[in-house]
Image (tube, rainbow, N blue to C red):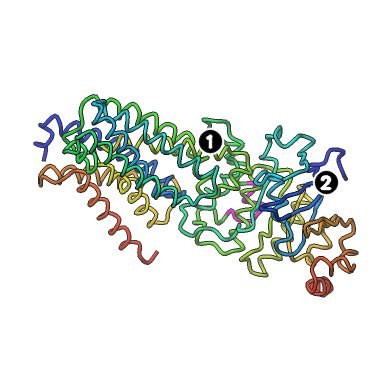
Amino acid sequence: MKFSVPIFDVKNLTFSIKGQTILSNISLEVFCSEYIAIIGPNGGGKTTLVRMLLGLETPTSGEIKIYGKKFSNFNEWHKIGYVPQRASLVDASFPATVLDIVKMGRTAKKQLFSFYGTEDEKAVYDAMSKMDILDLKEKMIGTLSGGQRQRVMIARALASKPDILILDEPNTGVDVASQKKFYTLLRKLNQEDKITIVFITHDIGVIADDIARLFTINQKAIICNNPKQLLSCEEMSELYGMDAHLLHLHKHRH
Amino acid sequence: MLEMFEYDFMQRAFIAGIIIAVLASVSGTFVVLKRYSMISETLAHSALVGVAVALVAEFSPLWTAVVFAVLSAWLIEYLRSAFSLYSDAVLAILLSGSLAIAVIIVSLGGSFNNSLFSYLFGSILSVSSDDIIIIAIFGTISLAILLLFSKELYFIAYDEEVAKTSGIKVNRLNFLLASVVSIIIALSITIIGSLLIGALMVIPTVASLQYKVGFLKTMLLSLIFGLLSVTAGMIFSFYFSLPSGATIVLCVLFIFIISLIVNRKK
């Protein structure tokens, strides 16, 4: 079901740095409760696009609207949960328990000069429960496995009760068994909790059945409303070269 | 041991030392976690420019030290955010530049003497009652700011980008932290000295990190180590006629080494 006002409405977005165009004339919309994947080769501009959606980079030209508001007027950032690429690669010596990390997700929601209250505690425990990490809450983050750390970072994003979750290749450093569990969790968040998911990945085969639309990005964007169809079309070869073949095979194995 | 408290200057030094231990260890926790340990050294040298100006112009060194340290903190944050300069390079440039300016000012003013020496290495004799009042007032304000923004500063230290995307005003808070740290450093150099205050900010936190506990416990341990070092340092400095700043730093180094040995298998 698509709402009339998209969460993200991107029009003619271009990003250049030092004379090199990273993204050219990108337009896309992300609607409520969608599950969207963004794929593309390394250096194709996927992460740059996400960084611009989050305000970490300023576009050279074009416009981004969030919930119908211009970027500069939007201030409900707690509605957007972000799990960065290096999510599971944390500094092992940082003094933080799992509870400390997940609580960070509530920080931006707090008023100035206020401390965590009962509502925050409930949101934090709900997020940890969803990610099945309640038993780890007193553990130091540096002692966890890659898969456990990944779930902690998603719990932190969920603690702010976001409408949308943006995940930038969060599987870096995570074992295969944990990755399967992770994809199931994402499906549940989208289907049961109606959280919109924007997922940057190379591993499109395993989530092809879950996603509604696929954005392929290599400087320019190709939007595909039927991801399975795209996996077999020639545009993938144009985008990925040899990888297109590998993706196709990967899909058939699942 | 109580005989040392019969002297007014020791009472004043102890009060100031305890306040500084609290301020340095709490602010030092955020500084170390942000991997910004060298900022304390740089700001201390910038504060020295203020001291040099005050010595030549015969003002109160405490005020000018605060002003120069805060200006330097803002300059560091501006250079870091406006130009793509490496943080450690910015700190190194300002550190050596500040020291050079301070020495030139004092030399031109003809007052490169014991007064400057006491601000380089700290002197318990130089703490006046007015200094105590200023340290107490500004110290309380600085501590209150750090504690009120502790959850935001902790998030920024862990992951600055995610903190920014969640709506936290990261740039403003970085400026605020740098300003508070610069005030604390300027207040501290009369006791510890500009060359040694960095150690009191950084080493208690690094020692507490060896115990691998959560954020609040790390800060608490850092506070305990800071207080222990200042207390022991002042006692040793009084009975063995040693410079207070250096003795305090040796005490905190001792705690660090013990912490390292005790936790080597963790």
The crowding category of the residue bearing disc 2, from other C-alpha atoms within 10 Å (few below 14, some 14 to 19, many at least 20), is: some
Residue indicated by mark 2: A29
Q: Chain of mark 2?
A: A
> In the figure, is residue A230 to the left or right of A201?
right
Query: In the image shown, does A126 or A75 lie closer to the viewer?
Result: A75
- Secondary structure at numbered mark 2: strand
Coordinates of residue B15 in the picture (x, y in percent): 23, 33
Q: Amino acid at mark 1?
A: Arg
Q: Are marks 1 and 2 on the same chain?
A: no
> In the figure, is residue B57 to the left or right of A215?
left
Q: CA distance from mark 1 to mark 2?
A: 32 Å
| Secondary structure, magenta segment, majority class | helix
Residue A110 seen from this side: yes
B247 vs A74: above or below = below
Residue indicated by mark 1: B172
Residue B132 seen from this side: no
Q: Quadrant of residue A8?
A: top right
Label of residue A139 in the image = none
The crowding category of the residue bearing disc 1, from other C-alpha atoms within 10 Å (few below 14, some 14 to 19, many at least 20), is: few
- Secondary structure at numbered mark 1: helix
Coordinates of residue A60 in the picture (x, y in percent): 72, 45
Q: Does the segment drawn in magenta span residue A130?
A: yes
Magenta residues, start to end: A126-134
Task: Give the quadrant of the N terminus of chain A.
Answer: top right
Q: Quadrant of residue B2?
A: top left
Q: Amino acid at mark 2?
A: Glu
Task: Give the quadrant of the C terminus of chain A.
Answer: bottom right
Coordinates of residue A164 in the picture (x, y in percent): 73, 46
Name the residue located 87 percent from the left edge and 38 percent from the top edge: A4
Q: Does the segment drawn in magenta span residue A238?
A: no
Name the residue located 72 percent from the left edge and 37 percent from the top edge: A71
Coordinates of residue A247 in the picture (x, y in percent): 80, 71
